[in-house]
Structure formats: structure tokens, C-alpha cells
Image: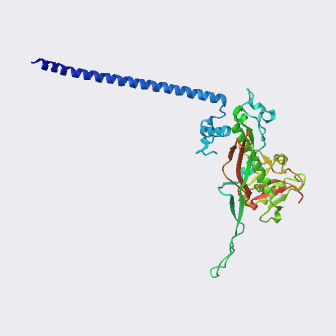
Amino acid sequence: MSTTESKARAEGDSMPDAASEMRAAMAGFVSDLRGFRTEMQMKMQQQEEKLTMLDRKSRSARRPTLATSADVEAPHQKAFQAYIRLGDDEGLRGLELEGKALNTSIAGDGGYLVDPQTSELVRSVLHSTASIRKIVNVVNVEATSFDVLIDTTDLGAGWATEMTPVGETGTPQIDRITIPLHELSALPKASQRLLDDAAFDIENWLAGRIADKFARAEAHAFLRGDGIDKPRGLLDHAVVDDADWEWGSIGYVASGSEAGFANPDALVDLVYALGARYRANATFVMNSKTAGLVRKLKDNDGRFLWSDGLAAAEPARLLGYPVLIAEDMPDVAAGSTAIAFGDFASGYTVAERPDLRILRDPFSAKPHVLFYATKRVGGDVSDFAAIKLLKFSTS
């Protein structure tokens, strides 16, 4: 064998060993790369967990969570807070969201809200928001008004025989009651410094106060509103003696005394002045002062006519019918109609747009931020036969 052939054979024998070494080196490199990637992923995950914990701690220290449902509503709450405080409405896009000036110079107007130590809650003395909304018919509309169709006449009928031709009978007539929607608005303002530095949840407090004010304004309008740019109240309609009642007015029963009750029989007369088909779902409505007088009434056997509810959420009852306390009802006085009784689900209708809108305006009253809140609602009597009143008079 020549020298050249020996050298070629030696090089051929060494080639498999070099390929094996190359494959082993590549496998080791890939294994090391995978280990490095796994290690980096673990470190990044740990870093993210630490940042998340720090973020939660900082947010909880700045704005304590007041309810366990806050996490569920976090997207809406964060978007609303960003809009109220900074005017950033980016988070509100795509989401379906269901006083006087505040400043930091005078204590009474919010000066103590930016002290280093401040109560997390604002303790407000709020008025009662009890309203007949709880017992009336409430409908949601997307138009500017709501029409109620009422059949006020009866269908004619008569007896027929086998041989006698049947004559034409009377046709019922349908009346239309239109309930327009009116705009209820509020325009409070707060300084931007207060929005930035307040220690308590100012946006939720402000929204709560607006909603409370709207509820009280509605409650008053549903009973006493004159129908001019507001709902027409139950007591704004003509009140006539029930013996002379006709459609378009509300019948009343006299109590027998201008200063109170001549005897408890007036309440019994009021109950049975209402038609039988309405009594099954009827409710008494009065304010607290009137309820205090009624609680003292007894029958001839010395038993109180008033009875408290047996269950926790059950209303008190008068002569077996539930009682709703509405503070906007008039007090007992000469000629006042201080007690209403009827099927309010049939007798009164509230029409509303199911949304409360808040517009943030940081430009019109610098350095204050205006919050323009609006709601559209209307109301009126829809069945005049479904409600009766007790009038404190001799006749």
C-alpha cells in the first residue's frame, strides 16, 4: 500500500469521531440554552409577582378597599376614578357603566380633607329617600315620552233570545295618557387639588351624593310635582268627594275632623271606597307624623289597628294592608289629604331612561372641575280609579 492510500484511510477513520464530537457539543449548547431560558423565565415571573404585590400594597395603603366586591368591579371602578380625577376617558370607552363648591382654603368647604391624617369616610346626615317608586309601576323607555292606553268605558252587552236579532252594542273607547320625560340635573364642583389629594374615595362619595339628591327630588315630584319641567305628582290632580268622583280626579273620604280622626271608622271607609279589584294589591301611604297618630288608634275592643311586620323586611300593616312611609306626604291639618290608599302599581306610572350620566368639565370653572350629572324621568297618574285619599275635614 502506498503512503498516499494509508494517509487517506487514516483521515477517513477520524471523520466519524469529529462528527460525534460536534453533535455532542451542539446538544450541550442547546441544553444550556434551554436551562438559561427557563431560569430567566422564572426570574421574570418572580419579578412580576413582586411588582404586583408592591402595586397592591401601595394601592391598598392609598385607597383602602371598602367592600369585597371591589375586585369584581375593578375595570369599571378604575376607569371611573381615572375620569373623575384626571379627565382620562380612555378606560370608559367600551364599558357600560351603570353640594356646593369644594376647596382647600375653608374648613367647612373641604379644607380639612387634605390634612396628613383624615378619616377615610365622610359621615353625612342624609334625608330619607323613601319614595312611592317602591310600589308604583316603573318602566324603562328610550323615547322622550311614554304613552299609557286606558280603557275608561265598558263594552255593551245584552240578553238575546233564539228568535230575536241581536242589536249593535256599545264599543269601548281607549284614552291615551302621555307621560313626558323631564331632565333632572346637578352641577357640583370640586377643586383639582382636592381630587388629587383627598384621603377618602371622593368620586364614589360624590356620585353617591348626586344619586341621593336625585332620589329625594324624584320622591317629592312623584307626590307633589306640578308637571312643569318635572313629573306630575299624585296630589297635584283635582281631589273631589268620592261620591262625586269621575275620571280625571281622585276621590277622597272625609275623616270627620279637621284636627285628626273623629273615630277609626274613617280608615275603614277609605279602604272600602276603593274598588274590590284594586284592594288586593293596595297600600297605605303616609308620612312619619301621620303614622304616629295612626298607631294610637284602636277598635271598639281595644285592639290597635296598626301591626308591625313579623319578618325583618316586612312592612307594617294597617287593617291588614302594608304601610309605606313617604315623608313628602302632607302632615295632618285642616283640609289636608295626609293618607293615600290604593293599588299604586295600577294607579301611578314612572317612566325613565335607565342611566345616570356624569360629564366632567375641567375647563369652565378653573381651577375647579365641574361634574354635570343628568337623569331623565317622568311620572303621572295612569288610573284615577286605583287611588283614594283620606281628607281631614268634616265633609
Asked which quadrant contains residue 93, the reply is: top right
Q: How is the image coloured?
A: rainbow
Q: How many marks?
A: 0
Q: Name the quadrant of the C terminus.
A: bottom right
Where's residue 120, x and y in %? Answer: 71, 31
Asked which quadrant contains residue 180, the reply is: bottom right
Closest to the observer: 194 or 383? 194
From the viewer's perspective, is 74 left or right of 222? left
Where's residue 241, x and y in %? Answer: 84, 62
For the point 60% across and 35% down, which residue is it?
71
| Residue occupying the far left of the picture | 1
For the point 79% across and 33% down, which residue is it?
105
For the point 60% across and 41% down, which residue is it?
90
Tell me if residue 364 comes above or below residue 7 in the rendering. below
Asked which quadrant contains residue 369, the reply is: top right
For the point 79% across and 36% down, which residue is it?
109
Closest to the observer: 304 or 200? 200
| Residue occupying the far top of the picture | 3
Where's residue 184, x and y in %? Answer: 73, 50
Closest to the observer: 276 or 213? 213
Where's residue 233, x and y in %? Answer: 78, 55
From the viewer's perspective, is 29 left or right of 376? left
Tell me if residue 74 comes above or below residue 130 in the rendering. above
- The answer to whether residue 321 is visible is no
Tell me if residue 27 comes above or below residue 222 in the rendering. above
- The answer to whether residue 171 is visible is yes
Q: Name the quadrant of the N terminus.
A: top left
